[in-house]
Image (cartoon, rainbow, N blue to C red):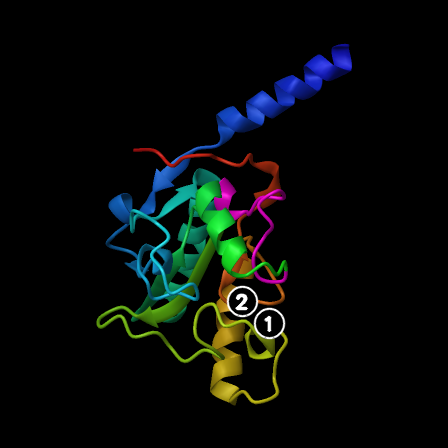
């Protein structure tokens, strides 16, 4: 009985420690935003989100700010262009219905790290005009060229830019997925609970 109570306490503590922060509002001077699922410009061809705001769990945001500092120290004229942040579970279900492939979309019953606020999709772009640097593929390309280890059919510039993003994010404490060059998980990403709704 004590063990059960302790586990419940840990679960509640984890939930209480989850804190979504509106990155779009607080750090609009640091980052560029193109939240793809708030538009029809995504692989579903439909608008999935009702808002183009970016929310992240506090620890993931802190790691992103560290990554931003690293990038700025190396290339002051560049910044991060953010494609996706927190994702409500209902939106995750819509994405799974459109692409039921666990290599690219987490099954709703498992839950996405995006739905915990601990995952971010991004690239590197020119700070002045917002132009992304050349990467192996477009965002949400489902195929070999988007893999972190892909080399066939890619230019050296594409490989170097992908690896630059990976090295910066890794240095800031992010993990990555092998199938998507744009997807990164914040520290201890899976230890946070799924959050049903973003703050209003």
On the question of residue 4 being in view, the answer is yes
81 relative position to 135: left or right: left
Which residue occupies the extreme front position in the image?
97
Read off the magenta span.
Answer: 103-116
Q: Secondary structure at mark 2?
A: helix
Q: In which quadrant of the rendered view does residue 57 lie?
A: top left
Q: Is residue 61 above or below residue 2?
A: below
- Disc 2 marks which residue? 166
13 relative position to 1: left or right: left
- Disc 1 marks which residue? 148
Compare residues 120 and 170 and report the one nearer the observer: 120
Instruction: Give the quarter of the figure containing the N terminus.
Output: top right
Locate residue 20, reporting x and y percent: 40, 37
Compare residues 159 and 77 and report the one nearer the observer: 159
Q: Secondary structure at mark 1?
A: loop
What residue is shown at x 46% (from left), y 34% (from top)?
A: 196
Locate residue 71, reporting x and y percent: 40, 65
What residue is shown at x 28% (from left), y 48% (from top)?
A: 24
The numbered mark at residue 93 is none
């Amino acid at each position: 009985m004590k063990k059960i109570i302790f586990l419940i306490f840990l679960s509640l503590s984890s939930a209480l420690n989850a804190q979504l922060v509106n990155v779009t509002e607080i750090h609009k001077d640091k980052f560029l935003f193109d939240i793809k699922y708030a538009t029809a410009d995504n692989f579903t061809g439909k608008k999935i989100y009702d808002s183009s705001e970016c929310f992240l769990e506090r620890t993931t945001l802190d790691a992103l700010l560290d990554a931003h500092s690293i990038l700025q120290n190396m290339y002051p004229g560049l910044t991060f262009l953010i494609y996706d942040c927190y994702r409500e579970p209902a939106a995750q279900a819509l994405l799974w219905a459109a692409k039921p492939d666990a290599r690219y979309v987490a099954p709703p019953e498992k839950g996405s790290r995006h739905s915990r606020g601990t995952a971010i999709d991004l690239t590197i772009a020119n700070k002045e005009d917002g132009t992304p640097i050349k990467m192996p593929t477009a965002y949400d390309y489902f195929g070999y060229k988007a893999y972190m280890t892909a080399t066939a059919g890619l230019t050296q510039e594409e490989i170097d830019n992908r690896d630059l993003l990976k090295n910066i994010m890794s240095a800031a404490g992010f993990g990555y997925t092998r199938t998507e060059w744009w997807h990164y998980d914040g520290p201890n990403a899976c230890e946070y609970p799924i959050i049903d709704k973003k703050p209003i």
